[in-house]
Image: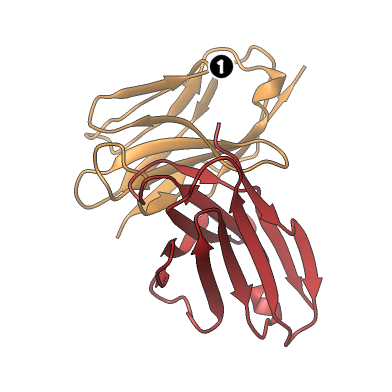
Chain colours: A red, B orange
Amino acid sequence: GAVVSQHPSWVICKSGTSVKIECRSLDFQATTMFWYRQFPKQSLMLMATSNEGSKATYEQGVEKDKFLINHASLTLSTLTVTSAHPEDSSFYICSAAWGGFYNEQFFGPGTRLTVL
Amino acid sequence: GNSVTQMEGPVTLSEEAFLTINCTYTATGYPSLFWYVQYPGEGLQLLLKATKADDKGSNKGFEATYRKETTSFHLEKGSVQVSDSAVYFCALSEGSGGSNYKLTFGKGTLLTVNP
C-alpha cells in the first residue's frame, strides 16, 4: 500500500523557535497533502490542504503566518511552526492523496511537538 | 457543521469477544462514512467505508452499516483478536461517492484485546 512518512517523529523545542516537520509520500506522487492537528483525547482537526506547486488552503481559525506549509514537490510537504509557544504543543499528522483531494488519503505516523 | 461522536474508550475485551464501537454523526448533505484504524506507531489506515444509506462496509471481519435514519455507522466484529488492538476513528467526508475530502473525525476509541 501507499506509504507516507513524517520526520521527525518527536521534537522538543524552546518557546520562540521555529520547527519544521516533513511529510513524504514514499511510493506514489501526492498531488494533494493535508495537515491535521490532534490534541490529547481529541479528534484530528484539519489545518490545511495543499496542492503541489500552489498555496495551501487553510481552515478557518488556523493562522497561516503561524503554520507555514510548503508543497514544493509531488513527494514532499513541510509544515513549519513559526515562533512556537507551549500552546502549539500537539500531535501533527499529515496525509497524502494521489490524483487530487477527492481520492483516498494515506496518513503519516504523526509528529509529537513539545514546546517548552 | 459536520460532527462525529463515537463512544469513548478505552474498550478492553478478551480474545474472541464481540466488538461494537458506536458512532453517530451530524452532517449537511449526504456524506460518506469511514472507519480508520491506527495501530501503535503507525499512521491511520482506512478500514472500511460506506458511501450511501444502507451500504455496508466490511474488511478484515469488521462491518459497519450506513444508517441514515439513525445517523449512525457503528463498527462491529464478531470475534476480536489480540492483533485488533488499536485506536479506531469514525469519520465522515463532505464529498459524496466515497470521496475522502475534508474528513471530520471522531475522537477515537482505544481497543485493547487480551489473550
Say what amino acid the circle numbered 1 marks. Phe
> In the picture, which quadrant includes the C terminus of chain B?
top right
Q: Is residue A32 above or below residue B114?
A: below
Given residues B77 and A24, the one toward you in this image is A24
Residue at (52% x, 55% y) in the render: A44
Relative to B102, say whether A13 is above or below: below
The picture places residue A28, in percent across and down from the top left corner, at 52, 42
Rendered location of residue A73, percent (x, y): 52, 60
Q: What's the chain of the residue with tag 1?
A: B
Residue drawn at (49%, 50%) of the image: A96
The residue indicated by pointer 1 is B18
Residue toward you, B70 or A1: A1
Q: Residue furthest left?
A: B29
Residue depicted at 56% across the width and 16% down the height: B18
Q: Nearer the viewer, residue B38 or B78?
A: B38
User: In this view of the protein, can residue A39 be seen by the observer?
Assistant: yes
Tell me: residue A14, above or below residue B21. below
Q: Residues within 10 Å of mark 1 (few under 14, many from 20)?
A: few
At 61% from the left and 44% from the top, the residue drawn is A26
What quarter of the picture does the N terminus of chain B occupy? Answer: bottom left
Vertical arrangement, residue A85 with respect to residue B35, above or below: below
**Residue B73: x, y in percent?**
37, 33
Label 1's element? loop
Camera sees residue B106: no
